[in-house]
Amino acid sequence: MVEDYSGLMSIYSKESPDLLRNAFDSILAQTILPKEFVCVLDGPIGLKLTEVVKWFKSECINRNIKIVFVKNPVNCGLGISLAEGLRACSYEYIGRFDSDDLNNPERMEVMLNYLNEDKNQDIAVVGSQIAEFSDSPQRLIGRRKVPISFNEVAQKVFLRNPLNHMTVVFRKSIILAVDGYKDMPGFEDYYLWMRLIDNGYKITNVPDTLVYAHVDGNTYARRGGIGYLRKELKFQYSVYSQNIIGTPTFVRNIFVRGIVRLLPQKWLAGLYKLLH
């Protein structure tokens, strides 16, 4: 089995130092450690976060993990940061890690085993299920289940995001073949999945819950309001103008997803929990 992979994470100034430290701990506890870890510092991150990053660098060196820093002089956003980080990764397999989530110790082992099975050589991206927590992963407050077959993913991709971004492992060469991540605030990953499927690549998920995702009181609220509606409209117009979706799907998404973005915060949070 090919075990060499790059880890990829983007960090910006509003991250929680404690959550970042815990996220790093869960990466260092992987049963298969990364050969290198690419850390994108998206603008100045402040003293406390810098201290956590320095600690992680020291731990990586102790474990013979090459650590690579990509530094943006100003905050550029997740899409641009991940595009830069992707190019800096040395290995074909890349595991995405979020700065406030906890990873099951066997996450990367499960994913790498899956991608290396003979029957899965045509899979470009694999993700997993997530469980959500606020204060402690011992007190779960929700889950987000996603499809576990490509056919189901392909059926649902035009309705909602079929992967949990913080769980994915992908093949670098294929991501670069569709020009990688783009600057599409709020939809960086969803836009990438749509372009992959449009170009004939397969994406899917395993049934295992391999990441514990941190959510807070504003997690779902941030996905609503006029500002997020503008992001939604930009995203939908982009995939429509590229003929990734047709006119009926475009109209339906503008109407249905547009209304959702304008729901009161409590209703929006309730809807997300119901869908999950």
Image (cartoon, rainbow, N blue to C red):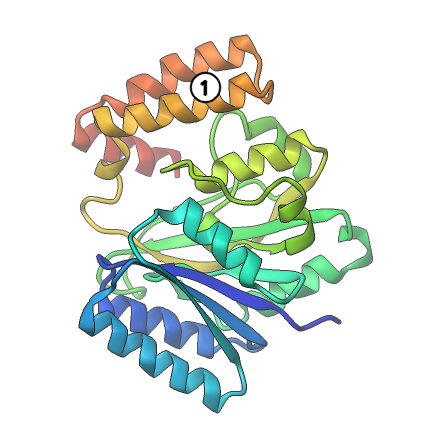
Q: Is residue 235 above or below residue 90?
A: above
Residue 50 position, x and y percent, is 26, 73
Residue 169 position, x and y percent, is 58, 57
Q: Which residue is mark 1?
A: 237
Q: Is residue 215 visible?
A: yes
Left/right placement of residue 160 relative to residue 11 reads right
Mark 1 crowdedness (10 Å alpha carbons): few <14, some 14-19, many ≥20: some
Badge 1 marks a residue whose secondary structure is: helix
Q: Residue at x 49, y 25 (%)?
A: 159
Q: Residue at x 48, y 23 (%)?
A: 238
Left/right placement of residue 106 relative to residue 113 reads left
Residue 203 position, x and y percent, is 64, 43
Q: Is residue 129 visible?
A: no
Q: Nearer the viewer, residue 115 or 20?
A: 20
Q: Quadrant of residue 74?
A: bottom left
* Quadrant of image for the C terminus: top left
Residue furthest right as drawn: 118
Residue 47 position, x and y percent, is 19, 73
Q: Residue at x 76, y 47 (%)?
A: 122
Left/right placement of residue 212 relative to residue 105 reads left
Q: Quadrant of residue 90?
A: bottom right
**Dot 1 amino acid type:** Tyr
Q: Residue at x 37, y 79 (%)?
A: 56
Q: Nearer the viewer, residue 46 or 15?
A: 46
